[in-house]
Image (cartoon, rainbow, N blue to C red):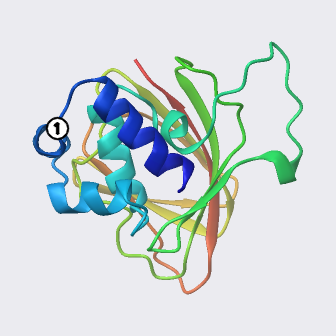
């Protein structure tokens, strides 16, 4: 069983939530939650994010076991990597501490990816996101305004705003993102 599946089931049951209650809170269907908990499918990052938010956790807290030391050296091989069904690769650069409200991620979007997630899903009201593009051109839509960020460009925004990332190119693109949760 994957760490995510184990964590989802434990947090859901510890919270006293039925699968249907979690489905209602996260806007993820009960059948999908059942398949994830039974390790029959891997959720997309969007689905995993909605489930994490409904359980009061960050996506990193759901995907990776928390660290316990006050100082941590993470080699590239030690950093947790998650690839979803859309072939989006998310590498967690920051250590995961229970309750830590900052995530530092390296993200790779495959060529031509039209949408990372439906606009408006998994917005973090009261949080912030900071992006730095390291390879290619990353598309970003915020409040229906389109931005094309090229290598070296950075962008800051309040993460409660409706937003979506996409890859407008025929090449894989990469960026770093720091997410500050409220």
**Residue 51 image offset from top left, x and y in percent:** 31, 43
- Residue ID for mark 1: 18
Relative to 179, is 98 above or below?
Answer: above
**Residue 82 placement: quadrant:** bottom right
Residue at the (44%, 28%) spot, across then down: 128
* Residue 55 is at least partly visible in this image: no
Q: State the quadrant of the C terminus.
A: top left
Relative to 3, is 107 above or below?
Answer: below
Q: Nearer the viewer, residue 19 or 157?
A: 19
Q: Residues within 10 Å of mark 1 (few under 14, many from 20)?
A: few
**Residue 38 image offset from top left, x and y in percent:** 37, 59
Residue at the (39%, 41%) spot, across then down: 8
Relative to 2, is 72 above or below?
Answer: above
Residue at the (61%, 41%) spot, across then down: 64
* Residue 70 is at least partly visible in this image: yes
Q: Nearer the viewer, residue 180 or 92?
A: 92
Considering the numbered disc 1 on the image, is that residue within a helix, a strand or a loop? loop
**Residue 73 image offset from top left, x and y in percent:** 89, 31
Q: How many marks?
A: 1
**Residue 164 placement: quadrant:** bottom left
């Amino acid at each position: 069983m994957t760490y995510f599946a184990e964590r989802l089931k434990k947090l859901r049951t510890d919270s006293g939530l039925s699968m249907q209650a979690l489905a209602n809170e996260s806007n993820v269907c009960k059948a999908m939650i059942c398949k994830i908990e039974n390790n029959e499918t891997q959720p997309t990052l969007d689905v995993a994010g909605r489930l994490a938010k409904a359980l009061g956790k960050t996506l990193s807290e759901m995907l990776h076991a928390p660290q316990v030391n006050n100082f941590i050296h993470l080699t590239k091989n030690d950093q947790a990597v998650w690839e979803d069904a859309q072939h989006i690769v998310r590498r967690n650069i920051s250590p995961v501490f229970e309750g830590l409200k900052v995530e530092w991620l390296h993200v790779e979007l495959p060529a031509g990816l039209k949408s990372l997630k439906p606009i408006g899903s998994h917005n973090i009201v009261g949080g912030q996101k900071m992006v730095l593009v390291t390879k290619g051109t990353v598309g970003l839509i915020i409040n229906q305004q389109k931005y094309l960020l090229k290598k070296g460009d950075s962008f800051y925004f309040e993460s409660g705003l409706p937003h979506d990332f996409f890859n407008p190119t025929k090449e894989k693109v990469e960026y770093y993102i720091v997410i500050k949760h409220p």
